[in-house]
Amino acid sequence: MAGQRAGLHADMTTTQQAGGASPVDFDHFGDYGDFRRKQADQAAAPKPGEFVRPAYPFRGRVTADGSSGYPAVPGRYHLYISWACPWAQRSAIVRMLAGLEDVISLSAVDPVRDGRGWAFREGPGHSLDPVNGFALLREAYDATEPGYDGHISVPVLWDRETSRIVSNNFPDITIDLGTQFGAWSNGSVDLYPAAQRAEIDAINATVYENVNNGVYRAGMATSQAAYHDAVTRIFATLDELEQRLAGRRYLLGESITEADVRLWVTLARFDVVYYSHFKANLRRLTDYPNLWAYARDLYSRPAFRDTTNFDHIKRHYFVTHSHINPSRIVPDGPLLDWDAPHERAGGARRRLD
């Protein structure tokens, strides 16, 4: 088995070329294999057929005082992201909300990945690697941990000074961007205010388990029972959030917090992808008056709008997940009016009976 892994690894890393990764080639490289590896090892799943998210092993933290070994300083860190990935979009939203575009650089990978995983190519909305000249994101993982054979994920926070990954643990990255770069932040938002952290953490935990990761648990389930459990929990939580937003503009009141960023990236993809592709289809986002208006309210802000690329989102999910969509056909719809008036600022909010 070790020899097979080594051979596969070598094959994947010999595709670098001066212009980045060679084109996507499913026939030669196959599909990105995490799904099949996870599902083959059902011993790791608490219930048969249930999706298990892989580990995120790089968990360094950036601190304002540098006590973690990674001080918050301008120009040192780079974010590798995919505009398609909800976890990665969170980091881009927080970076823009805090006004850190000139403090932390950012680049995006090709939204379509074959068996080699995320890759750097020139294209609309994505580019070659401007920091290291890598062809494949896995090279950043290899540079950090030689021979790394785990999950290759975005976002990645890269440290130029030590030439290694600081973190690929997406919940930590946005917290650190929002709290440790205050000396360079525009000060317009406090996404993780100390007095509300316990409440934010509680909401985030529920939303992550039942909504953010819940759509994946539905879409990647390989048993009816696991799928039904996931879908039931998705919509029970969305129903609760619909009621919560009847009495407040954002999840914790009149100010955007980390909780809104984390929920919004799933709402943005819900009708476009998750409703059909992941079979999360009891109701659409547009069937929830408050949630749909809330989502449009956030979208009206540049940090949410400008980091949302629906083309990347749709092509990533529908082309990459051949076990769900074997034809790799990307649907034309749905047609959604994200610019429709939301009437959330000082207006009435609809209560459900």
Image (spheres, grey):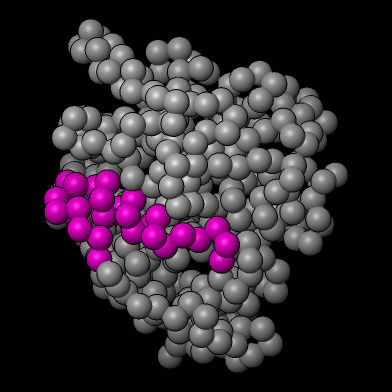
The residue nearer to you, when weighing 343 against 316, is: 316
Coordinates of residue 81 in the picture (x, y in percent): 51, 43
Q: Is residue 155 magenta?
A: no
| Image position of 346 (left or right of 274) | right
Q: How many marks?
A: 0
The residue nearer to you, when weighing 160 against 267, is: 160
| Image position of 2 (left or right of 83) | left
Tell me: residue 118, above or below residue 60: below
Which quadrant of the figure has residue 68?
Answer: top right
> Which residue is pictured at 39% across the width and 56% down the height?
313
In the rendered image, the quadrant that contains the N terminus is top left
Q: Is residue 230 visible?
A: yes
Tell me: residue 257, above or below residue 247: above
Which quadrant of the figure has residue 12?
Answer: top left
Coordinates of residue 219 in the picture (x, y in percent): 25, 54
In the rendered image, the quadrant that contains the C terminus is bottom left
Q: Is residue 232 visible?
A: no
Magenta range: 305-331
> Which residue is pictured at 18% across the width and 30% down the height?
28
| Image position of 320 (left or right of 145) | left
Tell me: residue 83, above or below residue 30: below
| Image position of 189 (left or right of 278) | right
Residue sitting farthest toward the front: 18
> Which residue is pictured at 29% across the width and 38% down the height?
24
